[in-house]
Amino acid sequence: MRVGPVRSAMSGASQPRGPDPAVPAARGVRTTPQPPPAAPGAGGGSGSAPGPSRIADYLLLPLAEREHVSRALCIHTGRELRCKVFPIKHYQDKIRPYIQLPSHSNITGIVEVILGETKAYVFFEKDFGDMHSYVRSRKRLREEEAARLFKQIVSAVAHCHQSAIVLGDLKLRKFVFSTEERGKMMLLSDKHGCPAYVSPEILNTTGTYSGKAADVWSLGVMLYTLLVGRYPFHDSDPSALFSKIRRGQFCIPEHISPKARCLIRSLLRREPSERLTAPEILLHPWFESVLEPGYIDSETGTSDQIVPEYQEDSDISSFFC
């Protein structure tokens, strides 16, 4: 995995930190002041997003729609990155997946890490939104577009599996667009799971479990959501949601092509051993049939088939992503 330099920050009489052993690819350390607190009223009142701040050579502009993520603008060059802020005590665990994941064209890497007194600032290449938000804005994707994007998603997962890396928390939000044209996907690792993507064997106390097969189930949920515009299993009550997942029963709308139906059913199988592997998914004929020249998609489905929105102030808001 690509990991850029680690720089240390100190303020006042505190001592500078040395290179962090958790980041083996670190190439240097630089002392940088901790960003000052926002001016009184800079956020516009309680409950509003924090105002701009500065760390090292970067101006940080918080993104209201993405918690703990900011636009990072280099004050010298104008280069724009994305910055995720973690508590200093936990940042090593947070960035470990980025270190473990093998380098791949559809897997993002860390550009730089700056360590403050209480926070760690982790910088990534600029992205152009995540897949979950894109699907919600489009209701659902036509099969040609879905196949093109899903193939990149599976390619990243297959590369991880072939390197003995199990992701375990796959979801649409983990994949972001690396270009403004939204033609290329990148895996942005984190450890915030979503129960809508959980496989049946994780919920059962008995039976076999395979981390790779669980990832494939999550891929099936993702493909269904791309093509249909809603999760195959969804409910506002977590216990009811888990019951539906355990049963593994779902309906595929008529507008989905036969080969796409075949692929979905090959991924969302209750028995883990019966699911395709990630490399096998890439060989499925659906990709070739949809991406070949002259393919004509069916008409767009009904507008009520959308990725469901959940109220953030709900007692179960943490169950959805």
Image (spheres, rainbow, N blue to C red):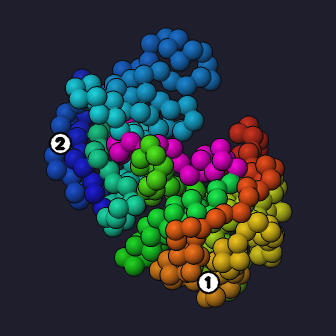
Q: Amino acid at mark 2?
A: Val
Residue 176, image x and y in percent? 48, 51
Q: Secondary structure at mark 1?
A: loop
- Is residue 283 at all visible to an observer of this figure? yes
Q: Which mark is residue 283?
A: none
Q: Report the label total.
A: 2
Q: Earlier in the sequence, mark 2 or mark 1?
A: 2
Residue 100, image x and y in percent? 35, 65
Residue 139, image x and y in percent? 70, 49
The residue beneath circle 2 is 29
The residue beneath circle 1 is 275
Which class describes the residues within 10 Å of circle 1: few (<14), some (14-19), or many (20+)? many
Quarter where residue 219 is shown: bottom right
Looking at the rendering, the stretch of residues picked out in magenta corresponds to 119-139
Is residue 132 covered in magenta?
yes
Could you tell me which residue is drawn at 63 percent across and 51 percent down? 135
Could you tell me which residue is drawn at 64 percent across and 88 percent down? 274
